[in-house]
Amino acid sequence: MLDDAFKQAEGEIFKTLRESEKDAFEKATIAGATGEQFAGQLKAYRAAPKIYMHEQQMATFEEALDGIRKYVVVAEPNDIQTTIIDLQEKLAPSLYQLGGIQESSEQ
């Protein structure tokens, strides 16, 4: 009987009831999604704990250092050669890119 009375409500009462229903639905949906996200994270952690923790650390670094140029160097402990690949836009041209500078062998 109360539900029927609510369905017949008009004006401010109707608006307030609809907003309450919307808020309740939103909170329930977010709670469900958060639970599913946690379940997925737990499954990933159990499958590969080291990889999961590494991914979480990298995501934290990425978020904390947003807007700062970062370099990641991946190498084996016994490697003696390092290859650097910079895929970002150059902020300033290097001396080699300026042109007009030539070596002179005259003394």
Image (tube, grey):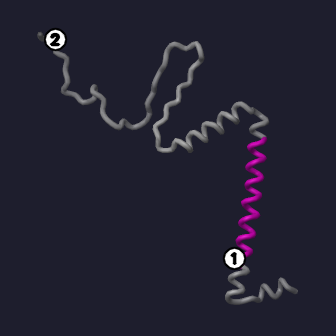
Where's residue 48, x and y in %? 75, 32
What is the spatial separation of the Cα atoms under label 1 and label 2, in whole angstroms?
82 Å
Q: Helix, strand or loop at disc 2?
A: loop
**Magenta-drawn stretch contains 5:** no
| The residue stretch that appears in magenta | 18-42
- Disc 2 residue type? Ser
Classify 67 as above or below 90.
Answer: below
- Disc 1 residue type? Glu
Residue at numbered disc 2? 105
Q: In this view of the protein, which residue sits in the foreground, 85 or 95?
A: 95
User: Which label is found at residue 19?
Assistant: 1
In the figure, residue 76 lies in which quadrant? top right
**Magenta-drawn stretch contains 40:** yes
The quadrant of the image that shows the N terminus is bottom right
Q: Residue at x 71, y 89 (%)?
A: 10
Classify 106 as above or below 83.
Answer: above
Q: Which residue is drawn at 78% across and 85% down?
A: 7
Q: Earlier in the sequence, mark 1 or mark 2?
A: 1
> Magenta part mainly helix, strand or loop?
helix
Where's residue 103, x and y in %? 19, 17
Classify 29 as above or below 5.
Answer: above
Q: Are marks 1 and 2 in contact (CB under 8 Å)?
A: no
Where's residue 107, x and y in %? 11, 10
Q: Which residue is drawn at 75% across and 45% down?
A: 40
Classify 63 as above or below 3.
Answer: above
- Residue 70 relative to residue 55: left or right: left
Q: In this view of the protein, which residue sits in the foreground, 51 or 8?
A: 51
Residues packed near mark 2 inside 10 Å, few (<14), some (14 to 19) or many (20 plus): few
